[in-house]
């Protein structure tokens, strides 16, 4: 019992998501984990990509025998039993479900059990690698974390999906804090981009709610300020690509009213796929490469609660 | 407490504090112009072309007002008059500050006070003529008769709709040069692939097509020239 309390106190949970597949979520999660483990933190990586688990690959590990499916299907009692140690000191892994057919959509009880078990684990950092998309399960993991981190690529589709992700996560969070069924219905309606009420942004929604129930409206404004998703731009090749993070941050603030924190970027480099091909983690195989350094800088920014600022660049 | 973009005062718009030095203002202007660069792929899915144009116009107005001492003084007086004490703390990024700042007050409409300032503003250039209202059609499926989206097919489709290069440039906020390059398939003169993709999405939308097939086919042609498969 004391152990559990201890664990609750100091642990931090980070979740890494993004609206799109194949944008480097697993690569970044895995290597953030390695970077933290090198800083002598006890790190647990959890492959929460229930549809297409591959976090083990970025760590250069084959498909482990025990995975999250054993836990979800109750073949084991506790999540401890599916934790495997990696060859990197301080770093362990809960590998993703491989055979759980409905894994992409665990039911409410399964998800609750997973989150409950995660909360009791003893580690300094638990990193969740999320699947692609904006399904409720993914959003719930994202919102459950202390730090929700979004990855984008400097290309229109990935950016569009990231905005959709931010908006959906925000509305979902909204819905959890309001009690009135009327407001819940209004939020549902607002999530449909083409809703007939002319609600296009969280701003519009709050305005409308304030008219209906001034108190709820103010409460939601507070929620809006507390919601601070974080952004990483991956596969950056030019200065303009780096700039995209600043533009997204400002646009989110001015359009949605949401504070997006720009943690940093990761440069594009062939050494990334070389490391994946040689089945050796990037931060181990090429610790001084530019992408590995970028990830280090991102980790430091989260730890120091800092963001990238334009003056660092120009 | 939370303000819509059109309700931000000039300081908030430039993300600076009210005691910013003129150097701060220059820097902020440079930075914010890069952020709202009309071709930025980070913007088009949130802001319409018209909105981006109007944000940029307001950024210009804010800069020109604040950068001259005289007009800045007048503007500050105006801000005070509107019972909206400008936040005094420096340094902290505006996003945070704005929230702690003030109770809800009748907000300053930038457009009206802008006009007010304009009369007395010596160095101000006249406003450009208003943008023609361009209607972006809702995307349609692509008719099966189109076999491949080459540059010349794009050009033909554009002309079929009686859209000039100039109009298309206004609709998409792309430079006319880029539209010419896209249509001429001058691949080497086009920007890097991720940008080109963004341009093509805008182009497709302006033609009224769903973008996916158009973009992919065009990029395939682009890749064949620019990123030929490596010989083994
Ligand atoms: N900074 C980079 N430089 C070069 N290549 C990169 C970079 N980041 C990612 N990649 C490439 O992108 C591929 C996909 O990365 P990853 O598997 O981490 O994406 P993901 O978002 O987790 O995908 P999924 O949605 O399928 O889980 C990697 O195998 C790698 O080859
Ligand atoms: Mg992955």
Image (spheres, coloured by chain):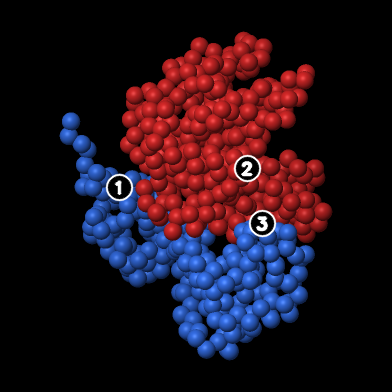
Chain colours: A red, B blue
Q: Indicate the quadrant containing the C terminus of chain B: top left, top right, bottom left or bottom right.
A: top left
Q: Are marks 1 and 3 on the same chain?
A: yes
Residue corresponding to mark 3:
B96
Residue corresponding to mark 2:
A169
Q: Is mark 2 within 8 Å of ligand 1?
A: no
Residue A123 figure quarter: top right
Question: Dot 2 lies on which element?
Answer: helix
Is residue A297 visible in the rendered structure shown here?
yes
Residue B94 figure quarter: bottom right
Q: Indicate the quadrant containing the N terminus of chain B: top left, top right, bottom left or bottom right.
A: bottom right
Question: Dot 3 lies on which element?
Answer: helix
Q: Nearer the viewer, residue A283 or B77?
A: A283
Decide: is A57 above or below B135.
Answer: above
User: Where is residue A17 shown, x and y percent of the image?
Assistant: 54, 37
Labels 2, 1: front one = 2
Residue corresponding to mark 1:
B219
Label 1 CA crowd tier, 10 Å (few <14, some 14–19, many 20+): many
Chain containing the residue with disc 3: B
Decide: is A237 above or below B13.
Answer: above
Chain containing the residue with disc 1: B
Are the residues at dot 2 and dot 1 in contact (C-beta closer than 8 Å)? no
Label 2 CA crowd tier, 10 Å (few <14, some 14–19, many 20+): many
Q: Is mark 3 within 8 Å of ligand 1?
A: no
User: Where is residue B210 shown, x and y percent of the image?
Assistant: 41, 50
Q: Nearer the viewer, residue B61 or B196?
A: B61
Labels 2, 3: front one = 3
Is residue A196 visible in the rendered structure shown here?
no
């Amino acid at each position: 019992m004391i152990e559990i309390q201890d664990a609750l106190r100091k642990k931090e949970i980070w979740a890494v998501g993004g609206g799109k597949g194949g944008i480097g979520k697993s690569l970044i999660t895995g290597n953030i984990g390695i970077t933290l483990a090198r800083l002598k933190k006890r790190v647990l990586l959890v492959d929460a990509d229930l549809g297409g688990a591959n976090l083990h690959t970025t760590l250069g590990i084959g498909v482990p025998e025990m995975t999250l499916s054993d836990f979800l299907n109750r073949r084991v009692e506790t999540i401890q039993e599916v934790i495997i140690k990696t060859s990197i000191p301080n770093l362990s892994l809960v590998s993703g479900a491989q055979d759980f057919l409905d894994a992409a959509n665990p039911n409410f009880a399964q998800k609750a059990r997973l989150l409950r078990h995660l909360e009791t684990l003893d580690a300094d950092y638990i990193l969740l690698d999320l699947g692609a998309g904006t399904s409720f399960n993914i959003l719930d993991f994202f919102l459950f974390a202390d730090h929700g981190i979004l990855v984008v690529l400097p290309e229109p589709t990935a950016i569009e999906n990231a905005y959709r992700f931010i908006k959906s996560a925000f509305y979902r969070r909204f819905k959890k804090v309001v009690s009135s069924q009327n407001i819940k219905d209004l939020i549902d309606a607002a999530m449909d981009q083409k809703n007939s009420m002319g609600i296009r942004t969280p701003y519009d929604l709050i305005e409308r709610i304030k008219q209906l129930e001034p108190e709820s409206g103010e409460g939601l404004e507070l929620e809006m300020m507390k919601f601070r998703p974080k952004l990483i731009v991956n596969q950056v090749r030019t200065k303009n690509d780096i700039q995209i993070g600043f533009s997204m941050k400002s646009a989110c603030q001015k359009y949605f009213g949401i504070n997006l924190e720009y943690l940093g970027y990761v440069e594009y480099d062939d050494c990334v796929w070389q490391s994946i091909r040689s089945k050796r983690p990037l931060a181990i195989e090429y610790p001084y490469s530019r992408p590995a350094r970028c990830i280090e800088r991102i980790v430091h920014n989260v730890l120091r609660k800092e963001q990238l600022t334009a003056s660092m660049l120009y | 407490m939370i303000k819509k973009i059109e309700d931000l005062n000039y300081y908030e718009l430039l993300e600076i504090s009210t005691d910013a030095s003129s150097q701060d203002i220059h820097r902020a202007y440079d930075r914010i112009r890069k952020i709202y660069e009309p071709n930025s792929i980070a913007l088009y899915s949130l802001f319409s072309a018209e909105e981006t144009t109007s944000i940029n116009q307001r950024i210009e107005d804010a800069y020109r007002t604040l950068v001259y001492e005289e007009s800045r003084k007048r503007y500050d007086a105006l801000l005070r008059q509107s019972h909206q004490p400008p936040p005094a703390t420096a340094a902290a990024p505006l996003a945070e500050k704005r929230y702690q700042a003030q109770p809800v007050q009748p907000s300053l409409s930038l457009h009206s006070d802008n006009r007010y300032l304009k009369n007395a503003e010596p160095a101000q250039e006249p406003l450009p003529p208003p943008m023609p209202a361009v209607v972006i059609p809702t995307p349609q499926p692509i008719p099966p008769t189109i076999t491949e989206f080459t540059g010349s097919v794009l050009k033909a489709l554009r002309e079929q709709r009686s859209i000039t290069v100039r109009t298309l440039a206004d609709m998409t906020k792309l430079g006319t040069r880029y539209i010419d390059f896209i249509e001429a398939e001058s691949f080497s003169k086009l920007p890097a692939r991720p940008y080109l993709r963004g341009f093509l999405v805008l182009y497709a939308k302006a033609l009224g097509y769903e973008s996916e097939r158009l973009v992919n086919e065009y990029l395939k042609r682009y890749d064949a020239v620019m990123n030929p498969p490596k010989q083994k």
